[in-house]
Amino acid sequence: MDQLRPLRGGRRAASDLAVTGDFALRPGRVHEICGPARRSLALRVAARLAGPVLWIRPAWQAERLNPDGICAVVEPGRLIFVDCRRADDQLWCLEEALRSGSVPLVVAELAQPPALTPVRRLHLAAEAGAAAGGAVPLGLLLTPGDGGAAGVESRWQASPAHQPEAAFWRIVRLRARTRPPQAWLMSGDGDLAPLPEAGI
């Protein structure tokens, strides 16, 4: 019972989604993942949820996910891609998808972090989607560089840290409402090993 918290409509939110180790995200909220491996980490989140994933991306962006490259992490058929011509359309699409509660995960690849007001609207939309009785939606903002979206529930940074014998990623919790900053090394199978504080 202590893992649940009431939403505005009186309904209780699901407990945090444990992606791997201490990497956990609260459903019904919007989180930010930044850094060069942000898509890889978002795919790890998608793998932990059942059902379709709405992936919103800018139409002008040449980079696309390769189905052959992601099939080891998540079934490519679960991903529904939406290409938006304007940045405002991306935020609108994200807000409406969260409000509907029809998919458990909505990912938006953004060219820059949104301001506080749009992020607040996204949180309210996710709460409305959870209260609608469908899935408790989780929103992910994928931003370049060090991110910096104001008002997000948590901010994570993902970067490659590959070694000759295996693939590794450096995962850093830069900001979270209830947890301190921390860094980990994530292996290809998703295991996390804590890094010293100097690694943050």
Image: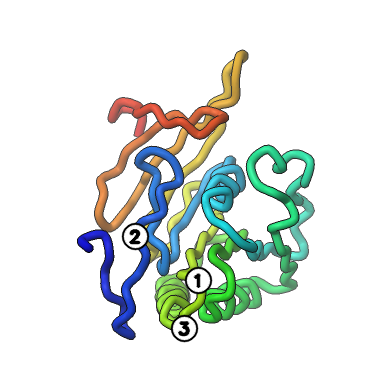
Tell me, for residue 135, which label it has, or none.
1
> Residue 59: image x %, image y %?
76, 65
Most foreground residue, 13 or 147: 13
Tell me, for residue 169, which label it has, or none.
none
Q: What residue type is labelled 3?
A: Ala
Say if residue 63 shows up in the picture: yes
Q: In which quarter of the image is residue 111?
A: bottom right
Q: How many labels does the image show?
A: 3
Q: What element carries label 1?
A: loop
Q: Quickly name the residue at label 3.
A: 132
Q: Is mark 3 on a helix, strand or loop?
A: loop
- Distance between the Cα atoms at labels 2 and 3? 17 Å
Residue drawn 44% across and 59% down? 31
Q: Is mark 2 on a helix, strand or loop?
A: loop
As drawn, is 145 to the left or to the right of 78? Answer: left
Question: Are there few (<14), some (14-19), or many (20+) residues within 10 Å of tag 2?
Answer: some
Say if residue 110 shows up in the picture: no
Residue drawn 72% across and 68% down? 82
Residue drawn 51% across and 28% down? 187
Q: In this view, does 31 lie above or below 194?
A: below
Pick whichever of labels 1 and 2 is earlier in the sequence.
2
Q: On the rendered image, what quadrant is the C terminus found in? A: top left
Q: What residue type is labelled 1?
A: Ala
Q: In which quarter of the image is residue 116?
A: bottom left
Pick whichever of labels 2 and 3 is earlier in the sequence.
2
> Residue 30: image x %, image y %?
44, 65
- Distance between the Cα atoms at labels 1 and 2? 13 Å
Q: Quickly name the residue at label 2.
A: 15
Q: In this view, does 146 lie above or below 125?
A: above
Q: Which amino acid does label 2 sit on?
A: Ser
